[in-house]
Amino acid sequence: MKKFLLGILVGFLLSALTAVILFFVAVRLGRRPPQIPEASILLLRVEGNLPESPPLGIPVPLLQRVQPVTVIEHWEMLRKAAVDARIKTVVLMPQDVHAGWGKLQQIRESLAVFRKSGKPLYAYLRAPGTREYYLATAAERIYMGPEDYLDLKGLRVELVYMKNTLDKIGVDAEVATAGKYKDALDTFTRSSMSPETREVMNSILDDLYGHLVQTIAESRKQAPEQVRQTVDQGPFIASQALARGLVDGLIYEDQLFGELQNRLKLPDLRKVAVRDYRRVPPGSLGLEGRRRIALLVAEGTIVRGGAGVFGDEGLLRSEDFVRLLREVGNDRGIRGVIVRIDSPGGDGFASDEIWREMSLLSKTKPLLISMSDTAASGGYYIALTGDPIVAYPGTLTGSIGVYYGKVNLRGLYDKLGIHKEILKRGRFAEIDSDYVALSEEGRRKLKASIDEFYRSFVTRVAESRKRAYEQVEPLAQGRVWMGDQAQQNGLVDHLGGLDRAIDLVKEKARIPAAEKITLVIYPPRRTILERIFGWPPDALLDSRLAPFFRRFGTKTWLGGGVMRMMPYWVEVK
């Protein structure tokens, strides 16, 4: 019996050892640069979410292929393809893209830069919507299937209001705000849109729609008014899209590659996938220099503390980001820093912690701020180091305001037969209880605190932008601006993307404009194994429900707290 059990144990250990060896062999193979054949086509499949920071990866080649490609990786791949003699053309194939307009503008700008290389850029669309078509307008020719459908019909904003529902279940959301546009919690306290929110949303739609129309007009060589009239007739079946000049041909995918093969006069075409080509080192194509610039990604809702071993996707934790800032500050080889912000804000204290460390870093290294989809409220607050700020025309910016929120569940508890008894010492000991409504005295106290936080926020903006408080305050009030509107109002300095940010930080660091640099991304793409073996053991016990709560930001304010947060669940479709 002992021999039998020993045999089972030895067999188990050998199987486990074999699995580990095979796993690490797969990891090693997955890290090797891919072999790119001559006369290749890069299939640029832009799809799904477009994160700024790479999520934790599984170090197995087959599983790595389903990892999302970051915005920066798209930018880098197009730079590589422009100079890589093995890549003869790029075929853009966007599908089911979920990204804001800042990221879309970055990728479209990178496509336009690629076209300057003289290599062909074609687009092939499958069930395209407005986002996919917007990207495709960067191509010299746009194709779709003969029986496909172009869902181009304009833009809309949908806002959710749940007060009536909460009333039915006995839940009351109590809010104190500073700024008439600070509507981050209106979804819980109102049953319809406020006049201020309607004003801002119409302004956002006008700005984005004007940019969309102008882009299509320039790409398709039509007058803007003609494009507006065309969009008003959408959506379109494929034949209608062709008749209105929105696409150049209705063909199947194999016919597209046949046309490319004939145009390039090649006996054979080899297709290269994005998830292979992104592993080609830029240095192998002469795109890197000896001087290094750090690019720190600040992405997600700002909260306090540090993440566990698996992190908190969608959250920007102050302790983790401060640690990165200090790491970059202590690296003598880093000549300049770009902080890439994609955040709707969050916890006021955590935002201030990050701002402080960024301000300290700014004193030791040339610093520049690059804004992505969103840099609003706390996301804008951390950018106020006094350094140049670059935004896209479609970046949601500003929302300079503060709010406090808590929920009163007394009515719900009554419906469920739950009763609480409260004993207290101190006049305001129950101010954040979920069983007691705010008293008038408590509400006044909170409002005074919120107003003081608001004055501090506006003062910080005024000091950073070198303007008087009286000039900045009318631009605050919690209002969200688009990037081009923010530039007109002096809240950002330049419009542009990563290329513009790099040019400006090189100028600050006194690096010649023509000199190549090496861009070092923080945090880097890491695997689960690298995270586990580089993390304290007790972090394995850290478990949170961030994905469940993220939709309405309830995790960050449910228990009460001062927030610098914009209504980030607004999505322009």
Image: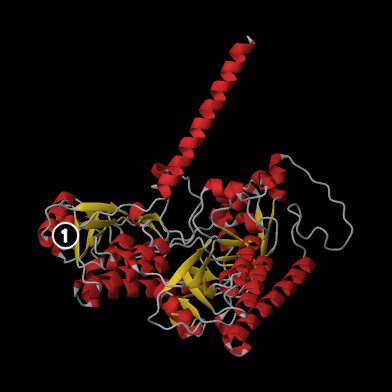
At horizontal 60% and vertical 47% (from top left) the residue drawn is 533
Q: How far across and down, in percent of the image, does residue 402 sit?
A: 64, 71
Relative to the observer, which residue lies in front, 50 or 572?
A: 50
Q: How far across and down, in percent of the image, does residue 16 sit?
A: 53, 30
Of helix, strand and loop, which one carries label 1?
Answer: helix
Evaluate whether residue 297 shows in this view: yes
Tell me the amino acid under the disc marked 1. Answer: Gln
Q: Which residue position is annotated with label 1?
A: 240
Tally the marks. 1
Q: Is residue 141 left or right of residue 84?
A: left
Q: Quadrant of the C terminus?
A: bottom left
Q: How far across and down, in percent of the image, does residue 251 sit?
A: 14, 54
Evaluate whether residue 341 shows in this view: no
Relative to the observer, which residue lies in front, 480 or 61?
A: 61
Q: Is residue 112 left or right of residue 101?
A: left
Q: Quadrant of the N terminus?
A: top right
Give the color scheme: rainbow, by chain, secondary structure or one colour. Answer: secondary structure
Q: Is residue 34 above or below residue 449?
A: above
Q: How far across and down, in percent of the image, does residue 118 sit?
A: 21, 71
Relative to the observer, which residue lies in front, 124 or 247?
A: 124
Q: Is residue 60 above or below residue 564?
A: above
Near mark 1 (Cα within 10 A), the count class, few <14, some 14-19 or many ≥20, is some
Q: Tell which residue pokes out farthest to the top in this image.
A: 1
Q: Quadrant of residue 300?
A: bottom right
At horizontal 57% and vertical 50% (from top left) the residue drawn is 531
Q: Is residue 302 above or below residue 474?
A: above
Q: Tell which residue pokes out farthest to the right in this image.
A: 425
Q: Quadrant of residue 393?
A: bottom left
